[in-house]
Amino acid sequence: MNVDKHWFEEGVFFAKKYFSWMARDNKRTRQKIKKYFTPEYMDALNFTGLNIEPLDILVFAHAGAFISFMIIFMIDLIVIFSYGLNIGAIDTLTLLLMIITSSFLPLIIMNLLANYPKTYARYVNIHSLGDIPEVLSYLVMYLKLVPNLENSVKFAASESSTSLVRDLRKMLWDMEIRVYHGINDALTNFADYWGRWSDHFKRALYLIRSSIQEPEEAQRVITLNRALDVGLDGTRDLMNQFASKLHQPTMFIYSIGIMIPLSLIAMLPAAGLVGMNVTIFQVFFLYDIILPLFVFLYTRKILLSRPATFNPPAIPSNHPDLVGIDTHKRLIISLVVGLLIAMPGILFMAIPMFMPGNSSNEILNFISNPSGLNSYFPVTLFIIWGIAATVTLYSLSVYRPYKKIRDNIKQIEKEFSDALYILGKRISEEKSPEESFMYAANTMEGAKIAKVFSHTSYNLTAMHTNIQDALFSSEYGSLRHVYSDRIKAIMRLFVEGIHKSQRSVSISIIRIADHLKELQQVENKIKDTLYPLTSTLKSTAAVFAPLIAGVTLAITKLISNIIHSMASKLPTETFAGGYSNTFASITDVFTLENVRPEYFVLVVGIYIIELVFLLTRFTNGIDEGDDKAEYMYSLGKIMPTAVVVLTITIIVGQILFSSIVRTI
């Protein structure tokens, strides 16, 4: 199996290649490394398994700060050029926002990158707790079949590829080199170590260890079931506690990150009444840089405290359905398509910069004039569509196969417990394995697992092979295209048990089927607990936030037009020295080229796209944990919905409100 590099390792490799000059390996740099990279930091780095050195991290952190500064600096140059290279003409608030973002954003990026290994170590630690149900289930299932503690640990270590199992393998290795006096001593130390983060895991391991000492079979099974219950109940309780604490942070994100900022947009045209000179650059820095950064850091903090429950099934990179996916090629295609869609908006925005103020070309005037095409259809929507098209096309084209494979695995695992129960019952009636597999396949007809069992029966009867090869042969095994570690592990238990006693293995298989049902019930209850939160946030990202933004932008255009209309109709002499100047200042502010209403549409549209990214990541992190494929697929599904809602709301709102303005 091909192992993909972590994004942080790829970033470090890129920084070493192009930015190594930013942190030379000299005495000063070594002193800095000794100061900041403490033993605790190095322990965290070693725990993550990232193949990088402190100097490399330092280079990457400086490179990230430099690149982010250059991006912000380019934006600052655009602002300065828009004011005719006259820095003195830039208002104080805009200048202050430029300084804040240029100074603090690179520092934040550098801090995030420099401390990422510690953050990732914490994530791996919490993520490892999500392996607890799987590890416990493998231990319990094996011990119900064969009461050998050492072999059960070896089985769990060999059948799983999770992060917690890496420590389990290390424990076995330490036992082999006599660090521990035996499996009981090793498992006790392992339980005490992980008990610092999960008391229920520690208790479950102690129960598993004590089950071996039970003299009677029935009592041993009761103790193992108790160990499993302790693990599952602890996992469920952790998630319930996390869900109960999510209400306030979710409301905070909903209000501070969405409702209040979008509501304030409608008040911008009236800001001139109190002497505020609102510019598009102020809105851009606040809404497209500072506010999304705040939401990102806040949601990131919440997700880092999420207790892991059940990790998603791993999909190997060499899966047949994934081999033909060229991510770089599809990214380039997506960017080209997005650029083509955005091009009309870019050109329409560029027209006023090169067209004379009183151009005689009526078509160009109609396109660029705020009272022309933009009063019904803001041309900057093309740019929003281009960005959304790029994200949607790439996400769905690359990650739809992952989603399909994962759904297929989950469906097979869901059906497997019922099929396993039928198989165990049939074997308990002293039927042959091939007949039992065929009976289970016929009973489960129409299910995906039925094809697997039918194939197994065919291998046993037609090819006269043994059960091991019928299931696991790389050439014709029925499980060679079943990418579920859980199913393969249980069937290996079945193969091991069938050679010893058909009757005992039938009893164990029935118990394992009941055990799988318990696992599925716990998974479903946890999802039901989280559903109200995740569904609300997903609806907000896909519908409510774009709807509110569209209505607010239409109201902003309405208020701006009303103020402009009132200012043009009221005689100056009526409000000499007083209100006339106020109305004049409002008119000046909202008729400047850099604050045209369609520019507000662009800035707020970018903010909505950023919200879709952030809220989708947040909801996916709550619901699925760290599942990149699920996140990207959800992003590809939600992004076009959000942009369509925003577009329709803006166009309908502007048409309706334009008719209101004409009646005033």
Image (cartoon, helix red, strand yellow):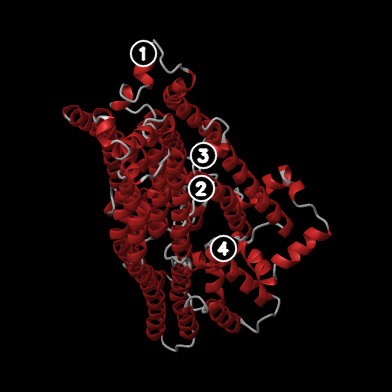
Whether the residues at callouts 2 and 1 have beta carbons within 8 Å, the answer is: no
Residue count near mark 2 (Cα–Cα under 10 Å), binned few <14, some 14–19, many ≥20: some
Q: In the rendered picture of this protein, how many numbered marks are placed on residues?
A: 4
Question: Which numbered disc, 2 or 3, marks the residue that appears first in the sequence?
Answer: 3
List x then y, in percent, for residue 535.
29, 54
**Numbered tag placed on residue 90 in the rendering:** 3
Residue type marked 4: Thr
Whether the residues at callouts 4 and 2 have beta carbons within 8 Å, the answer is: no
Question: Which numbered disc, 4 or 1, marks the residue that appears first in the sequence?
Answer: 4
**Numbered tag placed on residue 97 in the rendering:** 2
Q: Nearer the viewer, residue 403 or 1?
A: 403
Residue 284 seen by the camera: yes
Q: Nearer the viewer, mark 2 or mark 3?
A: 3
- Tell me the quadrant of the picture where the C terminus can be found: top left
Residue type marked 1: Ile
Question: How far apart in space, not on screen, are marks 3 and 1 (Cα)?
Answer: 33 Å
Q: Nearer the viewer, residue 306 or 254?
A: 254
Residue count near mark 3 (Cα–Cα under 10 Å), binned few <14, some 14–19, many ≥20: some
List x then y, in percent, for residue 405.
42, 46
Is 1 situated left or right of 600 in this image?
Answer: right
Q: Nearer the viewer, mark 4 or mark 1?
A: 1
Residue 402 seen by the camera: no
Residue farthest to the right, as pictured: 27
Residue count near mark 4 (Cα–Cα under 10 Å), binned few <14, some 14–19, many ≥20: some
Q: Which residue is mark 1?
A: 363
